């Protein structure tokens, strides 16, 4: 008998028919003698619908009182889907109980809309499991020290599931979704993308942080920190497939890197359209400039990703960096109002129509020329590279958004990712 956490995403919970299917699958696992905790997402579209209603009444703003209400609102999506799943399980003859995050309790800090889990009390859950019940815990949410409901950021149910698995020392965390595993790149963009039977934890961490939205980055961080065995698999297989076959399907996120994995120089390609580029032009090239610009941005709680500073000409230089698109207007306003006059720089310009494309692979550690192959492949397509950043196992470039699909396809082919 094992303790297993199942997580079902929004599409998997998207209708009563799908919820019934999830219930049949979960009941099958419980009948096989396992203790099962299920962490569902809201039904697909529900979180967007709720947040859209809020926006109709007042536009999004960096305001604690407003964000508190967004969490109060958005958390209801998971509360509804969890109760529906408990009802469906009971209808299958499987005793089941659902809890909202605060009832467990999943304690978080008070950073509304992007809270971080601090602790999980599993006492109540253990009691129910011992009594033969399947326990359902709402994804995406928790409660702060003052009893306010918080949410964990978009896609946060993955993190709820892995955190519960870590806290309960579960044998495995199975992330059921609408694709049958982690692919070499998003299979909805490149039809030749291939499923990876396993992917190293480090590569998964890079892919998630660079934009592969198949797993929320925090969930991978949790899995790494607490060594939670984790698998991504399909919720769309027939619910009654052989349980042993199901247990081995999908993609295993592994902590052991074998030789075969290092042979693949590039394992995956990630991309994201969430960033915007900002350039401060005509900056005097003297010590303390990067601090003056980026210090002001950091003080406004704005996260910066890629940074480049050009060589100076006549003692002046250009300084560029990227931020999340949602922070674009706030950052340029801030720079124009305060930093530009103080620095004596010429101009602040920006571009929101950019994207970041990244190649990821642990094999990059032991191979040279990987980045240059990437640049060659992009140049053959006539794609201009605006920014570059590298680390041990990834190379990222910023390019014009309109070339994103072309770039991803070209790189997928150049690194033979469509070949098994
Ligand atoms: P869920 O609702 O189950 O959490 P998500 O939409 O958050 O599902 O994540 C699954 C989606 O992630 C897939 O439908 C796919 O389009 C996308 N995706 C992006 N990159 C990858 C990748 N490398 N492998 C698999 N899926 C990916
Ligand atoms: N329902 C939340 C969202 O749409 C959390 C999740 O699905 O993981 O972002
Ligand atoms: Mg998701």
Image (tube, rainbow, N blue to C red):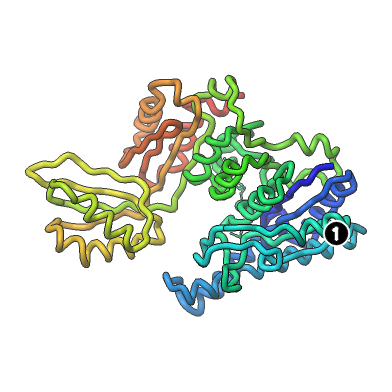
- Compared across the picture, whether 334 is left or right of 197 comes to left
Q: Tell me which corner region of the image, top left, top right, bottom left or bottom right, holds residue 82.
A: bottom right
Q: Which residue is mark 1?
A: 89
Q: Tell me which corner region of the image, top left, top right, bottom left or bottom right, holds residue 192.
A: top right
- Compared across the picture, whether 338 is left or right of 232 comes to left
Which residue is at the front of the view, 307 or 397? 307
Which residue is at the front of the view, 198 or 295? 295
Element type at mark 1: helix
Q: Residue at x 41, y 61 (%)?
A: 326
The quadrant of the rendering that contains the N terminus is: top right
Which residue is at the front of the view, 139 or 266? 139
Q: Residue 288 location in percent, x, y?
A: 18, 50
Q: Is residue 131 above or below residue 318?
A: below
Q: Residue 343 location in percent, x, y?
A: 15, 58
Instruction: Identify the residue at the far right of this view.
Output: 93
Q: Residue 122 location in percent, x, y?
A: 72, 57
Q: Residue at x 44, y 50 (%)?
A: 273
Count neighbours of disc 1 (C-alpha within 10 A) and say few if under 14, some if 14 to 19, many if 20 or more: many
Q: Residue at x 67, y 62 (%)?
A: 42
Q: Residue 207 location in percent, x, y?
A: 51, 40
The quadrant of the rendering that contains the C terminus is: top right
Which residue is at the front of the view, 79 or 271? 79
- Compared across the picture, whether 16 is left or right of 314 comes to right
- Compared across the picture, whether 401 is left or right of 67 comes to left
Q: Is residue 365 above or below residue 213?
A: above
Instruction: Identify the residue at the far bottom of this view.
Output: 57
């Amino acid at each position: 008998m094992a303790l297993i956490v199942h997580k079902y995403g929004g599409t998997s919970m998207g209708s009563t028919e799908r919820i019934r299917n999830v219930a049949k699958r979960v009941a099958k696992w419980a009948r096989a003698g396992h203790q099962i905790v299920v962490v569902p997402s809201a039904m697909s579209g529900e979180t967007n619908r709720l947040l859209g209603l809020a926006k109709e009444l007042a536009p999004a703003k960096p305001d604690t009182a407003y964000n508190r209400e967004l969490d109060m609102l958005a958390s209801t999506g998971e509360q509804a889907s969890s109760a529906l799943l408990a009802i469906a399980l009971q209808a299958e003859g499987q005793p089941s109980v659902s809890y909202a995050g605060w009832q467990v309790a999943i304690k978080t800090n008070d950073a509304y809309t992007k809270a971080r889990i601090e602790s999980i009390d599993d006492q109540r859950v253990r009691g129910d499991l011992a009594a033969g019940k399947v326990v359902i815990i709402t994804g995406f949410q928790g409660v702060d020290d003052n009893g306010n409901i918080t949410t964990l950021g978009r896609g946060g149910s993955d993190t709820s599931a892995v955190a519960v698995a870590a806290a309960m020392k579960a044998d495995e965390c199975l992330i059921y979704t609408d694709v049958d595993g982690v692919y070499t790149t998003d299979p909805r963009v490149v039809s030749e993308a291939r499923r990876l039977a396993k992917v190293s934890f480090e590569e998964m961490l890079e892919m998630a942080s660079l934009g592969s939205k198949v797993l929320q980055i925090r969930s991978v961080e949790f899995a790494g920190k607490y060594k939670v065995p984790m698998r991504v698999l399909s919720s769309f297989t027939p619910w009654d497939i052989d349980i042993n076959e199901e247990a081995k399907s999908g993609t295993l996120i592994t902590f052991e890197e074998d030789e075969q994995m290092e042979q693949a120089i590039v394992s995956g390609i990630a991309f994201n359209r969430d960033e915007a580029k900002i350039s401060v032009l005509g900056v005097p090239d003297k010590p303390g400039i990067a601090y003056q610009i980026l210090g002001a941005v950091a003080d406004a709680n704005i996260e910066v990703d890629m940074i480049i500073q050009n060589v100076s000409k006549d003692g002046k230089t250009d300084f560029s960096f990227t931020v999340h698109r949602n922070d674009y207007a706030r950052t340029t306003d801030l720079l124009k109002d305060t930093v530009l006059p103080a620095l004596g720089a010429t101009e602040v310009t920006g571009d929101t129509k950019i994207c970041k494309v990244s190649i990821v692979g642990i094999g990059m550690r032991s191979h040279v020329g990987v980045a240059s192959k990437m640049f060659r492949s992009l140049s053959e397509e006539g794609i201009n590279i605006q920014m570059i950043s590298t680390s041990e196992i990834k190379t990222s470039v910023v390019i014009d958004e309109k070339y994103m699909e072309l770039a991803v396809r070209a790189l997928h082919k150049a690194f033979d990712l469509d070949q098994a």
